[in-house]
Amino acid sequence: MVEWWRHAVIYQVYPRSFADADGDGVGDLPGITARLGHLADLGVDALWLSPFYRSPMVDGGYDVSDHRDVDPVFGTLADFDALLAEAHRLGLRVIVDIVPNHTSSRHPWFVDGRRDRYVFRDEPNGWQSLFGGPAWTRVADGQWYLHLFDPEQPDLNWHNPEVREEFDDILRFWLDRGVDGFRVDVAHGMIKDLAGVTLFDHEDVHEIHRRWRKILDSYPGERMAVAEVFDTAPARVARYVSVGELHQAFNFDFLEAPWEPAVLRRIIDASLRAAAAVGAPPTWVLSNHDRRRHVTRFGGVRRARAAVLLMLGLPGSAYLYQGEELGLPEVLDLPDEVRTDPQWVRSGGEEPGRDGCRVPLPWSGDAPPFGFGPGGSWLPQPADWAGLTVEAQRLDPHSTLSLYRDALRLRRPSDALRWLDAPDGVLLFETDTMRVAANLSGVPIRVMPATPLLSSNEMAGELPPDTTAWWTI
Ligand code: GLC
């Protein structure tokens, strides 16, 4: 049997914005548990939970102050156990986020002045934070500490064996509770060469992943880990998923690709090659909690639907981000005063930040908060989301939700792909089980006489522009 993660479709849940059970306007674990039926109906294999640990929430939970507890805003450890049990009962695996590059500045280590576990120096180098401004902050006695992200997210010192041991133990804590794996935040960041120019992808970071792989392999049940390695070439990313390291890495080249056939084909080929060279599955992703939603990026839901059928027709594993199955666009007009993302705050409003893809999901009803919870929602939802709720789309066979459900039911994952000759602007390939055509040209094309198994838009004979179709072979 092939390991489950090689072909899995994994759905990202951003807990603050999925579903709110207690009415405080922020999503929580009981809210997720109550809505797991939606994910089972959709037909995904697993969910990835963004952080729900104790956190001051400066960076939406990516600033962890206790890695072994649930933040009260999200519930309790008992709520987590209930979520996991219900997911497993429904046949869904659960992977959780692990944030090893930094902690919150309220983490007891930082509060207690354990400078040996962080990166303190007498002089800063010139590095800039990814959220804008310098990557160093000065403390009262004149020393500086490094933070690749917010000043409230001090970077850990991974040369200190105590840091390594602590994370071994954190992994075991969640594995013992029964999680199926981890999404590793900034997996290329833990080791720094302060004298050098590269902030990321230092050679010695691989030692940490090899150590973690051994821990994962010491548990039964095909536990896995997926690495977040951004701004890195495919051949370098592949090293994180080579033998003895992690299982998957996100495909940021695909996530960042424009809706252009030549670019997509080049990225697909490079991704397949890089993954095959190390025996890892290729992965694909169109949206996540850090990027502008692809409906908006591609210029409309029609292209977004074509893009997802293209993605789900490819070999390997795919990641979905909550709300994309509803065709949600990015919310571009959030009022300044509701924005919370440090990217927005730290850039003095120059960067719009990531709140626009984190607006709480619309589940039902005609008015905000659209069934998100009994209270309001921490970011306002657009009034015209009434037509995009799960309830509004569930029984409509032409809805985006139905398209995702059909695609996940009909998807026949394969390990290989062959390109076929096609007119300009058309991506046409066969896998072991399907023929897939995506028409990115401006004109209808004739591809196959047979009726497709599934298409992203209505078609009769010809494949219209901005449409993808699947045929059985
Ligand atoms: C990752 C997360 C992002 C977070 C950053 C710092 O890139 O996806 O949301 O802000 O790490 O933890």
Image: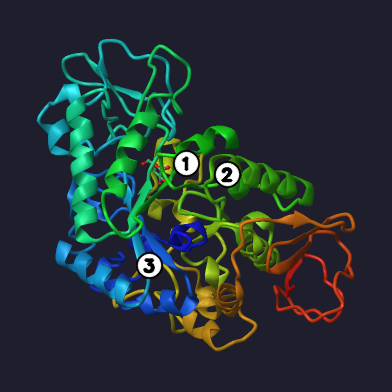
Q: What amino acid is found at the position of numbered circle 3 in the picture? A: Phe
Q: Residues within 10 Å of mark 2 (few under 14, many from 20)?
A: many
Q: Position of residue 84 (x, y in %)?
A: 26, 68
Tell me the quadrant of ligand 1: top left
Q: Residues within 10 Å of mark 1 (few under 14, many from 20)?
A: many
Q: Is residue 348 above or below residue 387?
A: above
Label 1, secondary structure: give it: helix
- Dot 3 or dot 1, earlier in sequence: 3
* Nearer to the camera, 41 or 352: 41
* Nearer to the camera, 366 or 268: 268
- Residue on which the image places disc 1: 241
Describe residue 141's horizontal placement relative to residue 377 as left or right: left
Q: Nearer the viewer, mark 3 or mark 1?
A: 1
Describe residue 122's horizontal placement relative to residue 126 as left or right: left
Mark 2 in CB contact with mark 1 (< 8 angstroms): yes
Q: Position of residue 54 (x, y in %)?
A: 20, 51
Q: What amino acid is found at the position of numbered circle 2 in the picture? A: Ala
Label 3, secondary structure: give it: loop
The answer to whether mark 3 is within 8 Å of ligand 1 is no
Q: What amino acid is found at the position of numbered circle 1 in the picture? A: Val
At x 58% / y 69%, what residue is drawn? 327
At x 88% / y 54%, what residue is drawn? 424
At x 32% / y 75%, what residue is drawn? 373
User: Where is residue 184, by image quadrant?
Assistant: top left
CA separation, marks 3 and 2? Answer: 32 Å
- Residue on which the image places disc 2: 275
